[in-house]
Image (cartoon, rainbow, N blue to C red):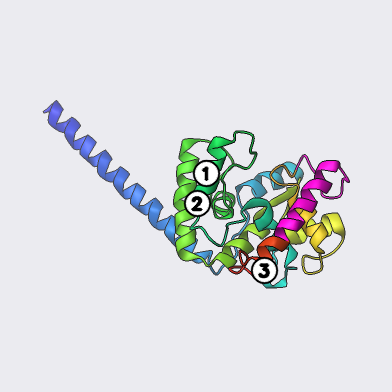
Amino acid sequence: MAIAGTKRRVRWLWRALRRGLMLAALVAILLVLLFRWVNPPINYLMAREWIRLGGIERSWVPIRSMADGLPLSAAAAEDANFCRHAGFDLDGIRDALGDRSRVRGASTISQQVAKNVFLWPGRSWLRKGLEAGFTVLIELSWPKRRIMEVYLNVAEFGEGVFGVEAAARHYFKTGADAIGPRSAARLMAVLPAPRDRSPVSGSGYIQRRGAAIQRGAETIRQDGRAACFL
């Protein structure tokens, strides 16, 4: 009798686990579909910084109202093949595995959106697995232009500064619609360490990195790699 009771409990727990996983998957799918049209609310990192700092700088702006230099610089700095991959840059992964000195590795803009919107900072296998799942859902559900738009509105550009509109006003006293190519490139040069760098610091690194990003932005504009978001 005891053995039979244990088996029943195990079966019940297994069924409950499966139902829980199916419900979680359904919620994830529905959220991804919703955020194709509805702008994501505050995320985990923003909430944490809001509590820590007592407030954050953030203002959503549609990609059509951004200067072209912002998405171009984002792609040049973070994911030059953004328009050509389906969420995972396999060439970038191979390069990252062969070059341990790379800071960003092979994390695409789509992967960063999955992490920034739906997950929490960290390096656990669980989080990486969830990131991969959300990346697939995002790529299947959103056009590339929407992925870029969300990325530019949720990325962190300084302590308590989120999104390109807030960043442009914080550092350059202008809106995302009027920021110049040089300033846009320097803004992206602070990634992936926005709390340790400033686009207006005048440091040699920011100047060199910004110049490289600006050249890369013009290159991907000319060779067609920006066609999916411009």
Q: Which mark is residue 63?
A: 3
Q: Position of residue 80 (x, y in %)?
A: 62, 56
Where residue 160 appears, x then y in whole percent?
Answer: 75, 48
Q: Residue, x 23% and y 35% (percent of image)? A: 10
| Neighbour tally class for label 3: few under 14, some 14-19, many 20 plus, Cα within 10 Å | many
Q: Residue at x 75, y 57 (%)?
A: 215
Front position in the image: 95 or 186: 95
Rendered location of residue 145, percent (x, y): 59, 67
Identified by mark 2, the residue type is: Phe
Give the CA distance from mark 1 to mark 3.
Answer: 28 Å
Q: Where are the magenta residues, as a range?
A: 195-217
Q: Where residue 227 sits: x, y (%)?
A: 60, 69
Sequence-wise, which precedes: disc 3 or disc 2?
3
Numbered disc in front, either 1 or 3: 1
Q: Do the residues under discs 2 and 1 have CB atoms within 8 angstroms?
A: yes
Element at badge 2? Answer: loop
Instruction: Answer with mark 2 or mark 1, whichever residue precedes in sequence.
Output: 2
Check disc 1 and report the residue beneath it: 93
- Decide: few, some or many residues near mark 2? Use Cα within 10 Å; few <14, some 14-19, many ≥20: many
Q: Distance between the Cα atoms at labels 2 and 1? A: 8 Å
Q: Taking 1 as reference, is 109 left or right? A: right
Q: Which residue is mark 2?
A: 88
Q: Main secondary structure of the magenta part?
A: helix
For the C terminus, the image quarter is bottom right
Residue farthest to the bottom, as pictured: 64
For label 3, the SS is helix
Residue 54 inside the magenta-drawn segment: no
Which is more toward the observer, 154 or 222? 222
Query: Horizontally, is 171 left or right of 142 in the view?
Result: right
Could you tell me the amino acid type at mark 1? Ile
